[in-house]
Image (cartoon, helix red, strand yellow):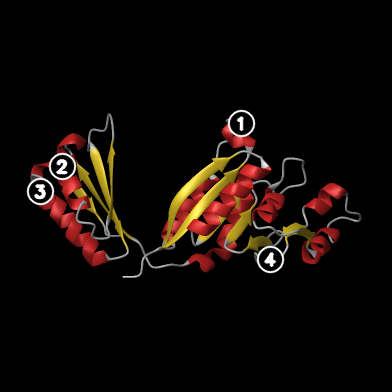
Amino acid sequence: MKPAKSAGIIIIGDEILTGKVQDTNTFFLAKELWSRGISVRSASVIPDITEVIAREVKDFSERFDFVFTSGGIGPTHDDITIEAISRAFGVRTVISDILKSSMERRHNHLTPAQLKMAEVPEGAELIDDNGLTFPLIKFRNIYIFPGIPELLRRKFLAIGDRFNGPRIFLSKVYFNESESVLAPSLDKIVALKNGVKIGSYPVIDNSEYTVMVTFESVDSTALDATVQLLLAKVPGDKVVRVVGPE
């Protein structure tokens, strides 16, 4: 069974790290990518520092099939994502004629700040987002998104078909049992290494259940078998319900 392709998300901005703005882009991207069969392996929030951005982007690009950055592509002094990506891969930052022309259609005269928004790493590809906003910048396997959540969502949904991978199946089992009691059985099943990812999530002050266990795999047969294996190890009166695969 072909494994899911991998992705990494990099959220760029001091405003996130200082709590002035709440990050919602990670949640959106992770959810959308998972629904398309892409497995997010890492998400990072980093400051507006060129060297930090360059190091993180280079590392993610080498480790994952897709990289999604968010933030740092506007007209102000702290919008340095394009410069950082250029530096990471040893290429020049250049003015895109396409982006420049697009901006000139909106403004009679481009200021230096506005012209900055036409910059791309040399060799970058521009992806049309069905005319919603400016084209999306892609460099190698890096998709460079704006930080504004509404714009990021619109752009991603416009190009989402690019990221269709093998379907990831999900099942959930809800238990009225303590996690410490379930843990030995879960450990034995995880040790089988059968391609099924298992997560255990306890809850507090819930009258219906105390633990939700999730099972994820691109192999629905292996997933079903793993769910049944756990159910066989737990008394039936401790199982609240089974959901999936979905």
Lower sequence index among marks 4 and 3: 4
Circle nearer the N terminus (2, 3) = 2
Q: Amino acid at mark 4?
A: Leu
Q: Quadrant of residue 244?
A: bottom left
Q: State the separation of the CA atoms marked 2 and 3.
A: 10 Å
According to the picture, the residue beneath numbered tag 3 turns out to be 233
Dot 2: element: helix
Q: Position of residue 115 (x, y in %)?
A: 83, 53
Mark 3 belongs to which amino acid? Lys
Disc 4 versus disc 1: distance between alpha carbons? 31 Å
- The local crowd at label 1, few if under 14, some if 14 to 19, many if 20 or more residues have their Cα within 10 Å, is few
Q: Nearer the viewer, mark 4 or mark 2?
A: 2
* Amino acid type at mark 1: Lys
N-terminal label among 4 and 2? 4
* Disc 2 versus disc 3: nearer the observer: 2
In the image, taking residue 244 as reference, residue 20 lies left or right, namely right
Marks 1/2: CA distance?
42 Å
Q: Report which residue position mark 2 lands on.
A: 184
Q: Nearer the viewer, residue 140 or 203?
A: 140
Q: Which residue is mark 1?
A: 20
- Answer whether residue 178 is visible to the viewer in this image: no
Question: Residue 126's mark?
Answer: 4
Query: Which circle marks residue 82 in the picture?
Result: none
Contact? badges 4 and 3 (CB < 8 Å): no
Position above or below: 178 against 193: above
| Circle 3 Cα neighbour tier, 10 Å, few/some/many (<14 / 14–19 / ≥20) | few
Q: Nearer the viewer, residue 53 or 25?
A: 53
